[in-house]
Image (spheres, rainbow, N blue to C red):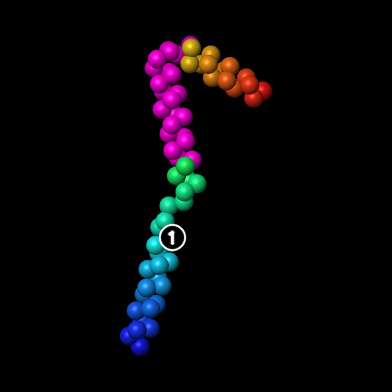
Amino acid sequence: MQPQKLAKNDQKQERSDEQDAPEPLKEILVALALSVVIIALRFFLDWGVSDFYAFFDGFLGIFR
C-alpha cells in the first residue's frame, strides 16, 4: 500500500505543478502592455502634454 500512496502523491504534485505554470500568452501580453506604457511615458515626458495628445490623436485617426 505504501508505493500506491507515493504514486498518488506524485500525481498530485504533478497536477499542482501544471496549475502553477505561467501561461506564455499572458506573459507576452503583460510584456507588451508594459512596453507600451513605458514608450507612452517617454513620449509624454519628452514632448509635453500637447504634443503627446496630438501624436496619439493622429495615431488613432489611422483606425477611424
49 vs 29, nearest the viewer: 29
Vertical comparison of 28 with 41: above or below? below
Q: How many marks?
A: 1
Name the residue at 41% across, 27% down.
Answer: 38
Element class at badge 1 = helix
Residue 29 x %, y %: 49, 40
Residue 18 x %, y %: 43, 61
| Residue 49 occupies quadrant | top left
Q: How crowded is mark 1: few (under 14 residues within 10 Å), some or many (20 or more)?
A: few
**Residue located farthest toward the bottom when viewing the structure as drawn:** 1
Q: Which secondary structure is most common in the magenta stretch?
A: helix
Give the side of residue 24 with respect to residue 57, left or right.
left
Residue assigned mark 1: 19
Amino acid at circle 1:
Gln
Magenta stretch holds residue 30 = yes
Name the residue at 59% across, 22% down.
Answer: 60
Name the residue at 46% across, 51% down.
Answer: 23
Residue 4 x %, y %: 38, 83
**Residue located farthest toward the left when viewing the structure as drawn:** 2
Give the side of residue 57 with respect to residue 30, left or right.
right
Q: Quadrant where the C terminus lies?
A: top right
Q: Quadrant where the N terminus lies?
A: bottom left
Q: Give the range drawn in magenta.
A: 29-50
Vertical comparison of 41 with 9: above or below? above
| Residue 5 occupies quadrant | bottom left
Vertical comparison of 25 with 9: above or below? above
Magenta stretch holds residue 57 = no
